[in-house]
Amino acid sequence: MLWLQVTGGEALIDPHFAASCRLAHDLGMMIEVLTNGTRLSNPATLAALAACRPYRVTVSLYGATPETYDAFTRRRGAFARVTRGLAAGVEAGLPLRLALIVTAQNAHEHDRMRELANGLGLPFKEYTHMSPTIYGGAESLASQSPAHLKPLERFTGCNAGHTFLHVDPHGRASICKVGRDEQIDVLAEGVQGLARLGTIADRLMLRTGGCSGCLLSENCSVCRPLAKRYQEAKAPLNTYCQHGRKGTTG
């Protein structure tokens, strides 16, 4: 294992965060932390990140003003906490990067979110496509801003289950955070059980489900596990499938 991405939920509120990162750091792993940034100004958090410095800390940004940010997160004072955390992270020299989450609720502040990132001197990446929940729920799809959706590139393959994997807080391993249909109980089987992930990945990637017989299957823009989530959520075809786009036949 060379690389460890710590995500959530919010990873920085976990009481085992510091100890886990220390273990991963001592094992020689490259660590990336995904966070909402509201805990970055906490002295104990900064000390933990300084002691086992990650190669990247990615902070999600949900708006550029207190009104929009707090409404989006449903947490009063969230914007003040995240801006305070970003300032503390910059001052501490952490390798910060921003993920600009553009939705229908905050799209009017899209340019201001970019300005905020540029003002802090931080690199950023924009995310406009929302995926269904890992359980196939559709509630996240309604938040998309149609005007900001970017065309998805053709899916050309993925090494999920072969060169990387996902493990949930209960020690259940799957090929990735989306393809959790088949999991391995690492606590029961040990790391030897991970050897089965490659076979599971190949099986999930070949699954056709509601797309059997499609003449455009080689030009899909999402993998099969993610397509299944969209189908379970009864998402509009244009969200994930070429059949939902104008001028497409097959």
Image: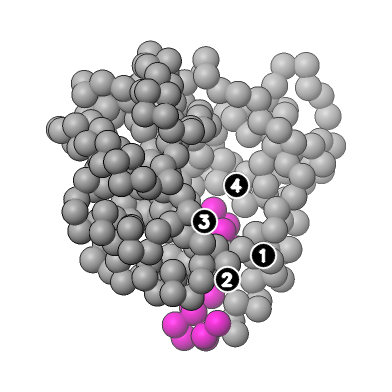
Mark 3 and 2 residues: CB-CB less than 8 Å, in contact? Answer: no
In 3D space, how far apart are the residues under numbered discs 1 and 2 (Cα atoms)?
9 Å
Q: Which colour scheme is used?
A: one colour
Which dot, 1 or 2, sits closer to the camera? 2
Give the mark count: 4
Quarter holding the N terminus?
Answer: bottom right
> For numbered disc 1, what is the local secondary structure?
loop
Which dot, 4 or 2, sits closer to the camera? 2
Q: In this view, does 68 lie to the left or right of 187?
A: left
What amino acid type should be assigned to the residue bearing mark 2? Met
Residue 63, quarter of picture: top left
In 3D space, how far apart are the residues under numbered discs 3 and 4 (Cα atoms)?
10 Å
Label 3: how many Cα within 10 Å (few below 14, some 14–19, many 20+): some
In 3D space, how far apart are the residues under numbered discs 1 and 4 (Cα atoms)?
19 Å
Q: What stretch is highlighted in magenta?
A: 175-191
On the image, numbered disc 3 is attached to which residue? 177
Q: Nearer the viewer, residue 228 or 205?
A: 205
In 3D space, how far apart are the residues under numbered discs 3 and 1 (Cα atoms)?
14 Å
Q: Nearer the viewer, residue 14 or 238?
A: 14
